[in-house]
Image (cartoon, grey):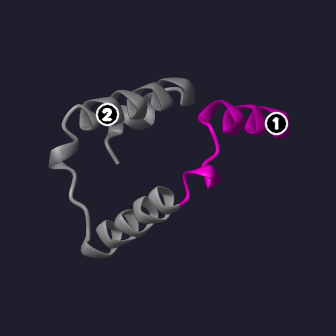
Amino acid sequence: MDPAFEKMTPSEQIQHVQDLWDHIAEHPEGIPVSAEMEAELDRRLAAHRADPSTAIPWEQVKAELRRRQ
């Protein structure tokens, strides 16, 4: 572990991790995807296309998560 990271407060550590994630997410093409994960993503997309009514809108998911807190 980086000693500088260890000296950060938990809040600073969380922000640092978020900044790292945002930086990585700027170039998703550079994130490796295993053959198994690609097959699972293809399966899920095919299932959604076959029956889009099974999808749950993001706003509904967020609302449910907030109710659980």
Q: What stretch of residues is rendered in magenta?
A: 51-69
Q: Position of residue 7 (x, y in %)?
A: 44, 30
Secondary structure beneath disc 1? Answer: loop
- Mark 2 and mark 1: Cα distance apart in space: 26 Å
Q: Which amino acid does label 1 sit on?
A: Gln
Is residue 16 rendered to the left or right of residue 56? left
Q: Position of residue 20 (x, y in %)?
A: 31, 33
Q: Out of 63 and 8, give the one closest to the viewer.
A: 63
Q: Out of 11 and 48, give the one closest to the viewer.
A: 48
Q: Out of 65 and 58, give the one closest to the viewer.
A: 58
Is residue 31 rendered to the left or right of residue 38? left
Q: Which of marks 2 and 1 is nearer the N terminus?
A: 2
Q: Out of 13 and 18, give the one closest to the viewer.
A: 18
**Is 59 covered by the magenta stretch?**
yes
Number of marks: 2
Residue under pointer 1: 69
Q: Residues within 10 Å of mark 2 (few under 14, many from 20)?
A: few
Numbered circle sitting on residue 50: none
Secondary structure beneath disc 2? Answer: helix
Residue name at image x 43 percent, y 37 percent: 6
The image quarter in which residue 3 lies: top left
Is residue 64 rendered to the left or right of residue 14? right
Residue 57's place in the image compared with 29, above or below, is above
**Is 65 covered by the magenta stretch?**
yes
Q: Which residue of the protein is positioned furthest toward the left in this rendering?
A: 30
Q: Which amino acid does label 2 sit on?
A: Leu
The image quarter in which residue 33 lies: bottom left
Q: Where is residue 60 in the image (x, y as percent from the top left)?
A: 71, 35
Residue under pointer 2: 20
Residue name at image x 74 percent, y 39 percent: 65
Residue name at image x 55 percent, y 25 percent: 11
Is residue 41 rendered to the left or right of residue 30? right
